[in-house]
Amino acid sequence: MQLIGVFAILHLLVYPASNGYNSYHDRDTESIGGLKSPPLATKELFWLVNAMDIAAVLLSMLFSWLFATQVLAYILASRLYSNRKTRIKRYPIAGFLWVAFFQGAFIYWTVQTGLFGEHSTQAVAGHQLWAKLMTSLLLGAVYPLTQIYQHEADKRDHVKTLSMLLGYRGTFIFTAVCFLLANIAGWMHFQERDFVRSFWVLQLFLVPVTIYFCYWFVQVWKDERAANFDHAMRMNLLASLCLNLCYLSFILSQ
């Protein structure tokens, strides 16, 4: 029940509300997230995401006050990132570090608290540092790829993203380096906990993602117009599918 509850709070309330709040402030008219032609954000969307966030915090209290506080902190961080008055996303380095930390290590810690309780060893902030570093590096690797097809839209919105700073080719090189560092951190985590076999199983499931990433990189190197929405969504869907199949295999092997 703990697992289902934490999953529902994050994936059915917190994350959708975060995306909705970001869309409300961005007023996107071009491809964004998983939508090629996003609908115009309205005031009704604003009130809906507020209601979802409140529901998420209230439900989190059923687990523990620490878990509820962590969920609230993530919601506030997400809003500071998107809100027009703070707009952390307009700064390429700060925006990158903000997302990598809060969507990576911080959420990893939050999930641990929700699953194991605030007083357990697993829920201590300093526990499993290699795993937390790996999640932040993985988020950091994906982050510029989600921006690569939005350069013109972001420029009109006076937002300078990390992908714009790096350029099209630089974005892929940066992502490759982050993935490499994430794998090193992953190896340290699995080896430290004597789960080396799990590390290699993860690598096996990531082979299709690596192949597609290299294919896309070659296409962009030849023609920067290949840095588009369709390729980004295929990459995102493939990575999500492979990771979820990997996690499912871990669960079934228990």
Image: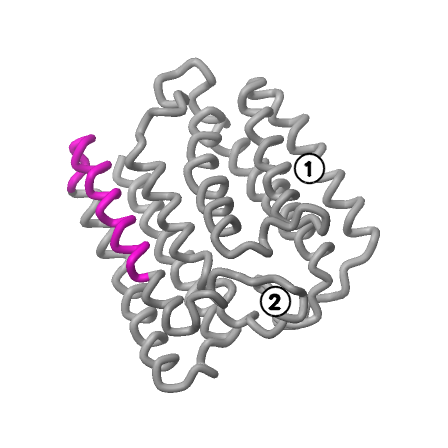
Name the residue rendered at 25%, 55% in the picture: 180
The residue sitting at the right extreme is 43
Name the residue rendered at 77%, 45% in the picture: 48
Q: Nearer the viewer, mark 2 or mark 1?
A: 2
Q: Amino acid at mark 1?
A: Asp
Name the residue rendered at 65%, 72% in the picture: 30
Q: Is residue 178 magenta?
A: yes
**Percent of width and height locating residue 54:** 71, 33
Q: What range of the chain is rendered magenta? A: 176-196
Describe the element under mark 1 as helix, strand or loop: helix
Image vertical order of residue 64 relative to residue 168, above or below: above
Task: Tell me the tag on residue 53.
Answer: 1
Q: Amino acid at mark 2?
A: Asp
Looking at this view, is 25 or 193 the one in front? 25
Describe the element under mark 2 as helix, strand or loop: helix
Measure the alpha-carbon separation of dots 2 and 1: 26 Å
